[in-house]
Image (cartoon, rainbow, N blue to C red):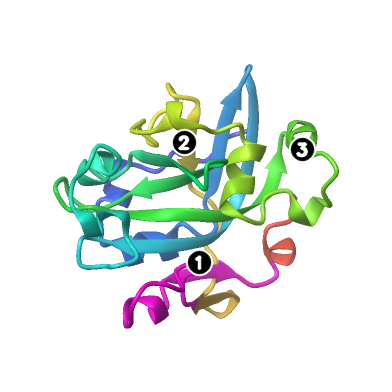
C-alpha cells in the first residue's frame, strides 16, 4: 500500500485559520511499537496569537507557550484540568504564537489499540474530543515540541481526502465561556458533518 505524503512545514507556515480548515480530512498518525494508529481529522479549533484572548499566548511567552513561538509544524502538547493531554499543531512563522487544537478524529488504523485504551466506550466516543484523541493514541508531554513533518518522533500528519465546503461547519470554539467578546463567538471551530460517510475506511 502506498502511503500518502507527510505534510510539509510549508503547510503549517500559513495563517492559523487556513491551516485549521485545511487539516480536516488529513490523517493523524501515531507509530507505537511498530504499528500505525491513525484517524482522519474531523474537528479542529484555531487559536491566533497574543491578541486572541482565548489563546494561551494571550499572556505572552512563558515556559508553557514557548513552543507556540517556534516555527509552524511542531506539536504543542499540554496538560489540562490535572488529568488530560491535548494536542495542537503550531502554525505560522517563527515568533508568532498560533496553533490548531485537534479536537476529534475518525479512527481508521490500530482499532484494537484504540479500543483497549478507550475501554468501555462506544466506538463513536473513542476519539470525539481532544483529550480522547490523546488517550486513544497514547500521546503525552513527551511529544511537545516534536516535528509533525517527519517520522522520528512517532507522530505526524499525512495528506488525505479534502473535506468539501458543503460538508464542513464553522462554529464558536468550545469551553471558553469566560473569554470576552468578540473572541468567545469567533467561528474558529471547524468540523466535518457526518464523518462516517465521508471518511469510512475503503
- What is the magenta range? 171-194
Determine crowd level at label 2: few under 14, some 14-19, many 20+ residues with C-alpha closer than 10 A. many
| Pointer 2 residue | 156
| Pointer 3 residue | 111
Q: In the image, which disc is placed on residue 175?
A: 1
Residue 196 in the figure: left or right of residue 18? right
Q: Residue at x 33, y 33 (%)?
A: 145
Dividing the picture into quarters, in which one does residue 168 lie? bottom right
Q: Residue at x 81, y 51 (%)?
A: 123
Task: From the viewer's side, name the closer residue of 39 and 174.
Answer: 174
Q: Secondary structure at mark 2?
A: strand
The quadrant the N terminus occupies is top right
All told, the count of numbered labels is 3
What x and y, as percent, mark residue 16?
31, 61
Label located before the other in sequence (2 or 1): 2
Q: Is residue 153 above or below residue 19?
A: above
Q: Main secondary structure of the magenta part?
A: loop
Task: From the viewer's side, name the closer residue of 120 and 26.
Answer: 120
What x and y, as percent, mark residue 17?
34, 66
Q: CA distance from mark 2 to mark 3?
A: 18 Å
Q: Secondary structure at mark 3?
A: helix
Q: Is residue 97 above or below residue 172?
A: above
Amino acid at each position: 500500500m502506498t502511503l500518502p505524503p507527510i505534510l510539509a512545514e510549508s503547510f503549517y507556515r500559513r495563517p492559523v485559520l487556513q491551516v485549521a480548515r485545511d487539516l480536516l480530512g488529513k490523517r493523524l498518525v501515531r507509530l507505537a511499537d511498530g504499528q500505525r494508529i491513525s484517524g482522519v481529522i474531523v474537528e479542529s479549533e484555531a487559536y491566533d496569537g497574543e491578541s486572541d484572548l482565548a489563546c494561551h499566548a494571550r499572556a505572552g511567552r512563558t515556559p508553557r507557550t514557548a513552543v507556540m513561538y517556534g516555527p509552524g509544524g511542531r506539536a504543542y502538547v499540554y496538560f489540562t484540568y490535572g488529568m488530560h493531554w491535548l494536542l495542537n499543531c503550531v502554525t505560522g512563522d517563527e515568533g508568532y504564537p498560533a496553533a490548531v487544537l485537534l479536537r476529534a478524529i475518525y479512527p481508521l488504523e490500530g482499532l484494537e489499540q484504540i479500543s483497549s485504551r478507550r475501554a468501555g466506550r462506544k466506538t463513536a466516543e473513542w476519539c470525539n474530543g481532544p483529550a480522547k484523541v490523546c488517550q486513544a493514541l497514547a500521546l503525552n508531554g513527551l511529544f511537545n515540541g516534536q516535528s509533525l513533518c517527519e517520522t522520528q518522533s512517532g507522530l505526524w500528519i499525512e495528506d488525505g481526502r479534502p473535506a468539501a465546503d458543503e460538508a464542513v461547519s464553522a462554529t464558536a470554539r468550545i469551553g471558553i465561556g469566560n473569554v470576552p467578546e468578540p473572541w468567545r463567538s469567533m467561528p474558529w471551530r471547524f468540523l466535518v458533518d457526518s464523518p462516517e460517510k465521508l471518511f469510512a475506511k475503503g
